[in-house]
Amino acid sequence: MPRAPCRAWAALFFFPATLSLVNTTFSEGRERNIALSVWAGSGAGGMVLGSLLGGVLTQAFGWEAVFFVNVPLAGIAIVAAFPVILGDSGYQSGGKFDLPGALTATVGTTLLVFTLVQGPEYGWASQGILVSAAVGILLLALFVAIEAHSRDPLLPLRLLANRNLSTGVVTTFLFTATFGSLLYFLSFYFQTVQGFGVLQTGFAFMVPMLAVLSGNALSGRMATRLGTRNTLVVSLAIGAIGTAGLGMAMSADSTYADLVPGLIVFSLGGGITFPTMFAAAAKGVAAHEQGIASGIASTGQQVGSAVGLAVLVAVANAGTGGLTGEALRVATAEGVRMAVYLAAAGTAAMILVALNSVVIEP
């Protein structure tokens, strides 16, 4: 089915482009903090609406409908963009596309993600997994060497000397590896353990998505008053506490009401963190390199999502082999809870990463 890969490719182009547009349009500081808050909030608002309408569409027309609905929505967005977004000027010419860098980075990262995803199934010591891991590491090392000697590098390594950017990239990686992956586990838990239907699951996501939206709204003001680093530390602490509380509330016998406090706190922390980590990644980067910085940060986000989901799924499935019926449901709840605890630990570890960033005065 080609539709899902095409949709993924479109998202990979769209996300860093919109992020770069925000970072270059609004000046660093309060103005950009508020703009990123609105940018993230629009995405969270779409998730709130999508959680509900996705369930309605799936129940009424089948899962294929969630792909088809993007066609008219994208068409409306394209038409609306022309009068709103100003045309670019001052193009730089003469550079060449870094094809060797793009190929080694893409194939190397894909092989490492394949290793993590398929390792539990094929066996970590199997020949295919070992070869995949070795070739992936080799290609990524080659990518670094290419970028260090290229006249037009895909990733100028000097940008990583900016501690805010490097910290932001690590944070986006870890954030989507933990917080981002939990959205999958929540959906799985609601349907497999609590027996929710598609529409019920959509309604169940309303509470955390509204909390995310609230966190997005708070993030800009917090970053302006407290500074980016302090805001990251506070939001990650909130997220870690909420995630741990969510894990404590999860069991085979839990009700949705049992989960609500943890859902609200963990989602609020995540909602504050999301725009703030991208504000940190953009700090101190020249306007003409914001597109590259946005691409680096969003790459960390996408790779983190794939790696985190692979690791957490392996943890969640560790004790479910050969089980059926009620025993499988109970083991699934326990496995999901362990994955949530691991995500909480990862979120807490991000506080140490955030403390590495440059102090950014309010």
Image (cartoon, helix red, strand yellow):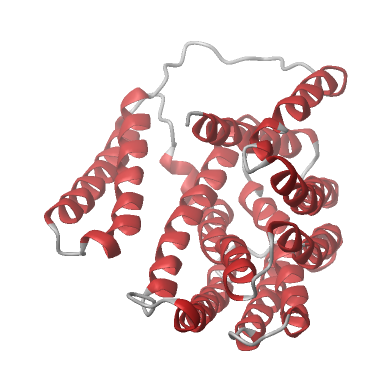
* Residue at 58 percent of width and 33 percent of height: 7
Relative to 181, 196 lies left or right: right
- Point 58% across, 84% down: residue: 252
Q: Quadrant of residue 175?
A: bottom right
Give the answer, above or below, for where 248 lies relative to 134: below
Report the side of 116 relative to 1 (left or right).
Answer: left
Please state the horizontal and vertical placement of residue 129, each as a whole percent of the image.
20, 55
Return the x and y of residue 57 as percentages of the image width and height: 74, 43
Report the quarter where the C terminus lies. bottom right
In this orientation, which residue lies closer to the viewer: 44 or 156?
Answer: 44
Q: Position of residue 265 (x, y in %)?
A: 75, 77
Q: Position of residue 236 (x, y in %)?
A: 65, 72
Query: In percent of the image, x 80 and y 64: which residue is there?
Result: 215
Residue nearest the viewer, comparing 104 with 93: 104
Q: Is residue 227 visible?
A: no
Residue at the limit of the structure toward the front, as seen here: 325
Residue at 62% x, 63% y: name it: 187
Instruction: Answer yes or no: is residue 243 visible.
Output: yes
